[in-house]
Amino acid sequence: MVMDTIFKTNKKEVIIGENKPFVMIGEKFNPSGFKALGQALVKKDMEFIQQLALRQVAFGADVLDVNVGYANIDQPQMMKMIVEAVQAVVDVPLSIDSNKRDVLQAGLQIATGKPLVNSVSGVESQMAGILPMVKERGAAMIGLTITEEGIPPTAEERLAVAGRIIERASQIGIAIEDIMIDPLVMPVGGDSLSATVTIEAIERIKQEYGVNICLGASNVSFGLMERHSVNAAFLPYAMQAGVTCAITDPIKLGGIIRAADMLLGRDINSVRYLEYARQAEILRQAEQQ
Amino acid sequence: MVMDTIFKTNKKEVIIGENKPFVMIGEKFNPSGFKALGQALVKKDMEFIQQLALRQVAFGADVLDVNVGYANIDQPQMMKMIVEAVQAVVDVPLSIDSNKRDVLQAGLQIATGKPLVNSVSGVESQMAGILPMVKERGAAMIGLTITEEGIPPTAEERLAVAGRIIERASQIGIAIEDIMIDPLVMPVGGDSLSATVTIEAIERIKQEYGVNICLGASNVSFGLMERHSVNAAFLPYAMQAGVTCAITDPIKLGGIIRAADMLLGRDINSVRYLEYARQAEILRQAEQQ
């Protein structure tokens, strides 16, 4: 049995759990590979930022991830500006995304309610530096199964890293339900078994620790042609294996995710699916005009 | 362990089996809901028919299904004409699709090699009428888990119908490896558990009888908006559960199917996926010009 993970703004709460609607964390606030966003950061174009926030939420994002990892900008200052700008236009909780303490700290100060920290890896210095910040802020967190040696090749080893992160977090008083684990997926183009290893890790971590699994799923298709087909085929497998939350593109993959929830018998009378499809159709028509 | 099902023309053989590339039977030759095809049948426009055959094969169809169920045409004659026209331009085996003996007979006479009969239901008169034709022609066949009372609501009952079809076919000497079963999927919009029932039926029939499962998968999305998302999410589940073949649209769903094969670890070095994606890209560019 998986425990519910809850985080929230002052206005909106998100509950992640088994047999609950799958939670989409919008991934678009990430300047790597998204040139227009990088330029908006450099120009401090908060209009662009706010439109991107509104668009993701309109397409069903329950949470927005904010990553400001870009060259030649003051990242802590930028994190503060974006969190403020986004909170001014949408109510959803935020996922503060960095591996730098000062950037995380900046986001956690400005975010209202109980935000999500993305992420804490199994690297010793990261656990020592970031877990106390999570505890002090009363935030939820994503633990990444990666160590000083990189991403372990087997499900067994990723389970062990998840265990170490959970143990260290628990020792300083972070509640187990505030911890989600991302067992990571490597590009399937580089290793034909990378998806099956991740699926096994998902099942074992869920079984062993009863935590929610939050997958950054798009990496599976890295380097391949027609990435959308690979991402769209992988999400149903991950959801069936027990993933309850993903950092993903709600505009491209929301339909697949809502359909998978429905096919798994988790959407009685297709209510959420139809709501999603209607809303998406209206938005796409409006954008084409 | 699932036995290999083989059928062929004089020029090309298709092998369906576990851990083999998933086999796509192109579904486009079906005039219900495809008005332009209906009109082509009425006009005996064999140019249209041949282009549709070439396009499906170019997008990766391993087999082509031929259904001439349309009003106001001589269906046996039309079946002969289409089989001849299609065989003149492509080498792939054909799936002769009808529940009428005279239409099936017409297709089986003209088809070269060893064709597929789609389908034989669990209705007594259908088994008595069609199984001997399958045996006499040395064809392969798809058995549908449907009876006089309709499609049974439970996986248990669909397993029982599959067993009756297999038993009756075996009694008259049809080899078990020439029988594939379609456990059928009802629209998920009408019953939230319809996909999970079918997944269970797939697993149980495969386990019990070791036959290949060939799913007409598109029905799952009937009546819903944005049907593509539902079909795209369902196929990976069906493939993981053990479906080895589907009657489907290779143009819309080939990418998802090749991606799912790859994610399940069945496409070493992504060879088939990349071949598919390259070919599809070239074709789409050519069609846009």
Image: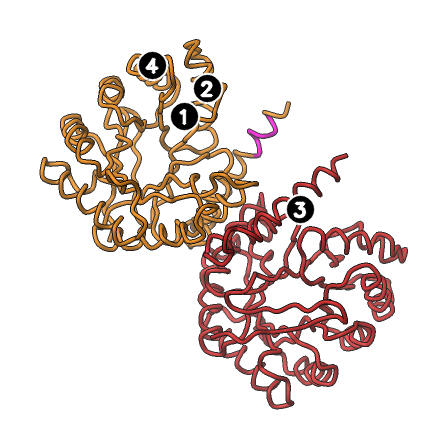
Chain colours: A orange, B red
User: Nearer the observer, disc 3 or disc 4?
Assistant: 3
The percent position of residue A233, horizontal first and vertical second, equals 49, 49
Tags 1 and 2 touching, CB below 8 Å: yes
Q: How far apart are marks 4 and 2 (CA)?
A: 12 Å
Q: Most prominent secondary structure in the magenta stretch?
A: helix
Question: Number of callouts in the render?
Answer: 4
Q: The numbered mark 1 sits on a residue in which chain? A: A
Q: What kind of element bears circle 3?
A: helix
Residue identified by numbered label 3: B279
User: Nearer the observer, disc 3 or disc 1?
Assistant: 3
Q: Is residue B226 left or right of residue B251?
A: left
Q: What kind of element bears circle 2?
A: helix
The percent position of residue A227, horizontal first and vertical second, equals 52, 40
Asked whether the residues under marks 3 and 1 belong to the same chain, the reply is: no
Residue extent of the magenta highlight: A281-286
Residue identified by numbered label 1: A30
